[in-house]
Image (cartoon, grey):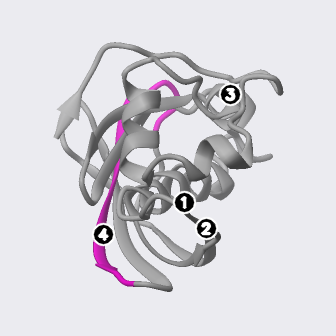
Amino acid sequence: MTETKHRRYAATPEELWSTDQLLSMSGLEAMQSILDGDSAGPPIGKLMGFHLAAVADGEVSFIGQPEFQATNPMGTVHGGWYGTVLDSCMACAVMTKVPQGSVYTTMEFKVNIIRPIPLGTEVRATGRVQHAGRSSGISNGEIRGVADGRLYATGSTTCIIMKLK
C-alpha cells in the first residue's frame, strides 16, 4: 500500500472537484491524487481529526485521533466518530475500484465498537474491499491503535456504484 507524508486537509468549496473533474479519473486515481497532495482532502477530515494515510487498489487507511470535541456527555468518544472514520475508510476503499466515468456513495454501513478509544490515542482505520462489481461494492474495516495494534472497532459497508459517462 502506498503511504505518504503529505497531509493536505480541508478543501475549500473552490477546491472540491467538479463532477466533470471527478468523472475524468478513476476512483483509484482520485484517491492517489489526495494522498500525493495534488488534490485537497475532504473537509470532514479536518472537522473529525483524521487524514488519508495510505491508498492501494481495494484498500485505504486513515490515521486520526479523537479529541475532546468528539466526546459524548459521558466524556468518551462518541460512536459517531467511529462511524465517520470507518465509513470514510471503507467507502474510499470501494472508491479505488470505481472506474473512470462512474461515482459511488454509501448505501448502508454497520459499526461494532469493541472498546473505547482513549482521547488523544492515534488510530489507523483501514477499509478493504470484499467485492466490487458494476453496481455495488462491499468493504470491511477496522480501527486499530497505531502504537499497539489494539482493535477498537470493526465495520462493514455496502456502496452503490453508478456509471454516469
Mark 3 lies on residue: 68
Instruction: Report helix, strand or loop for mark 4.
Output: strand
Find residue 149 and report its image quarter: top left
Q: Residues within 10 Å of mark 2 (few under 14, many from 20)?
A: few
Q: Nearer the viewer, mark 4 or mark 2?
A: 2
Q: Is residue 97 left or right of residue 38?
A: left
In which quadrant is the N terminus drawn?
top left
Side of 121 relative to 148 (left or right): right
Give the Cα separation between the discs numbered 4 and 2: 24 Å
**In this rendering, the label closer to the viewer, 2 or 3:** 2
Q: Is the residue under label 4 in contact with that under label 3 (CB below 8 Å)?
A: no
Q: Nearer the viewer, mark 1 or mark 3?
A: 1
Q: Earlier in the sequence, mark 1 or mark 3?
A: 3
Q: For the residues labelled 4 and 2, say whether their Cβ atoms are less than 8 Å apart.
A: no
Mark 4 surroundings: few (<14), some (14-19) or many (≥20) residues within 10 A: many
Range covered by the magenta-colored residues: 118-133
Distance between the alpha carbons at the discs numbered 1 and 3:
21 Å
Residue that label 1 marks: 87
Q: Is residue 135 left or right of residue 144?
A: right
Mark 1 → mark 2, Cα distance in angstroms? 26 Å
Gap between marks 1 and 4, in whole Å?
13 Å
Give the Cα separation between the discs numbered 3 and 4. Answer: 32 Å
User: At 33% from the left edge and 48% from the top edge, which residue is drawn?
Assistant: 60
Q: Going by the image, does 1 lie left or right of 92?
A: left
Q: Nearer the viewer, residue 109 or 4?
A: 4
- In the picture, which quadrant includes the C terminus? bottom right
Which residue position is annotated with label 2?
Answer: 165
Amino acid at pointer 1 = Asp
